Image: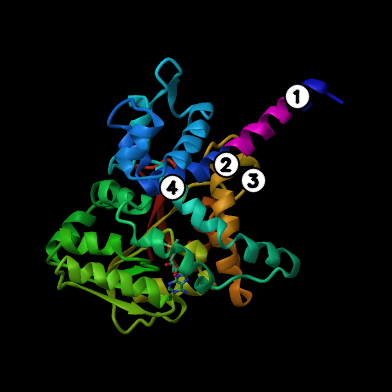
Amino acid sequence: MNTERGKAFAEHLLATLNGGALTMLVSLGYRTGLFEAAAAGPTTSTGLAERTGLAERYVREWLGAMVTGGFFDYDPADATYTLPQEHAGMLTGDRAGNVAPMASTLRALTMALPDVERRFADGDGLPHSVFAPHFETVSADPGDSWRRIYDEHLIDGFLGAVPGLHDRLTGGGRVLDLGCGAGHAINLMAKTFPASRFVGLDIEPRVIASADAERAQLELDNVAFEVGDAAALGAERPYDVITAFDAIHDQHDPDEVLRRVRDALAPGGVFVMVDAKFSSLLENNVGNPFAPLCYSISLMYCTPVSLADGGAGLGAMWGTELACRMLDAAGFGDVEVLDSPRPQNCIYVCRP
Ligand SMILES: C[S@@+](CC[C@H](N)C(=O)[O-])C[C@H]1O[C@@H](n2cnc3c(N)ncnc32)[C@H](O)[C@@H]1O
C-alpha cells in the first residue's frame, strides 16, 4: 500500500464530491439570477436576497457553499459577499465563456439518472422521449450553453473553417441539418445566408416544434423543419451541404445514416460533421481535462439513446479514429479533420 497515493486519492474524492454538489448550486445560481445580481457589487445576504427577490435564508445557505467552495469572497467585518470580477466573467453574461448554463444542462441529465441506472442491469437503451421532458427547460432557455456557442462560433468558427463554404452558402445552396434539435444552429445559418434554403430534420417532435417556433419568431422563410429518422433519409432531394452538429454519435444506426448522407449529396456536395474531439482509444484520452465530463455526458445521454431499440451504442466518445473508418466505409473517400474554436470539438469535412 502506497499511503501517499491513498491520501492523494482521498483528496481527489473529496474534491469530486464537492464539485458535484457545487455544480448543482451553480445551476441554482444561474437559474435564479443570483450570479448576475452578485456581479453588481459586494453585498450582504439580505442585500442579495433583495436584489433577486429571493428568500434570504436560502440565499445565505447558498452563499455559504459559494464562499467555502471558492466562488465568492467573504468579509466577516461587515458580512459582505463579493463575486470577484475574474470569477464573474465565467459565471455571468451572454458569452459562450459563461459556463454556468452547463451546470443547468448537467442538472437536467441527472433527472434521467434513475432510468440510466436501471439500464445497467439489462443493457438496453433509452429513447429520446425519456430525456425530452427534462431537456425542455434547457432548450427553451435563451441562455442555453449550445445556443451561446452557436451565436459566437457557428458562422465564423465552425462554418468559416471549411474552405469555400461561406461562398457556397452566400451564393445559394440547398442545406440539410441532421439531428437539428431545437434548431438554433440552422435558424442562425438561414438568417446569415438568405440565398440558401435549409431543412432541419430531427426524430423528436418536441424539439422540431421548438425549432419551428424560433423560425417563426425570426420570420425566416428559407428554412423548414421536418420530423423524421435520419436512417430513412432519401436521395430524391439532393443537398449541396449536409451538416450534423453533435448528432451522429447519438444515432441508432450511424452506418446507415452516413451511407444515406453520402447518397443524398448533390455532385460536388459536402458533409460537415461537428463532433467530440477525442481518441477512440481510452488510453489516449487520459489526461485530457474534458474527457471525464464528456464520458459522463456520453454515459448519461448519448450512449443510452444510441443503444435504444438494439442500436449501435456509439456514444460521444467514439473518437476520431473510428469516425474516420466509418466515414470511409460509408463512401467518403476524402475526409479532413479540422480543429474547431472549441478544443472539445473537431470538424469533419467529408466528400465522396
Ligand atoms: C445532442 S442533440 C444535438 C442537437 C443539435 N444538432 C444541436 O447541436 O443543438 C442530437 C439530436 O439528434 C437527434 N436524433 C437522434 N437520432 C436521430 C435520428 N435517427 N434521426 C433524426 N434525428 C435524430 C436527437 O433527437 C437530438 O435532437
Q: Which mark is residue 282?
A: 3
Marks 1 and 4, the one that precedes in the sequence:
1
Residue 46: x and y, percent? 37, 33
Q: Which residue is mark 1?
A: 7
Residue 322: x and y, percent? 56, 56
Q: Which mark is residue 21?
A: 2
Nearest the viewer among 270 and 249 is: 249
Query: What is the total number of numbered labels drawn onto the structure image?
Result: 4
Marks 1 and 3, the one that precedes in the sequence:
1
Q: Give how far apart the Cα atoms at labels 4 and 3 are.
A: 24 Å
Magenta-colored span: 7-18
Kind of residue at badge 3 = Leu
Q: Which residue is rendered at x = 44% and y = 82% of the image? A: 232
Q: Secondary structure at mark 4?
A: helix
Q: Which mark is residue 275?
A: none
Label 2 or label 3, whichever lies nearer to me, is: 2
Label 1 or label 2, whichever lies nearer to me, is: 2
Q: Secondary structure at mark 3?
A: helix
| Residue 12 on the magenta segment | yes
Q: Which residue is mark 4?
A: 102
Q: Secondary structure at mark 1?
A: helix
Q: Is residue 296 above or below residue 189?
A: above
Q: Give how far apart the Cα atoms at labels 1 and 3 are.
A: 26 Å
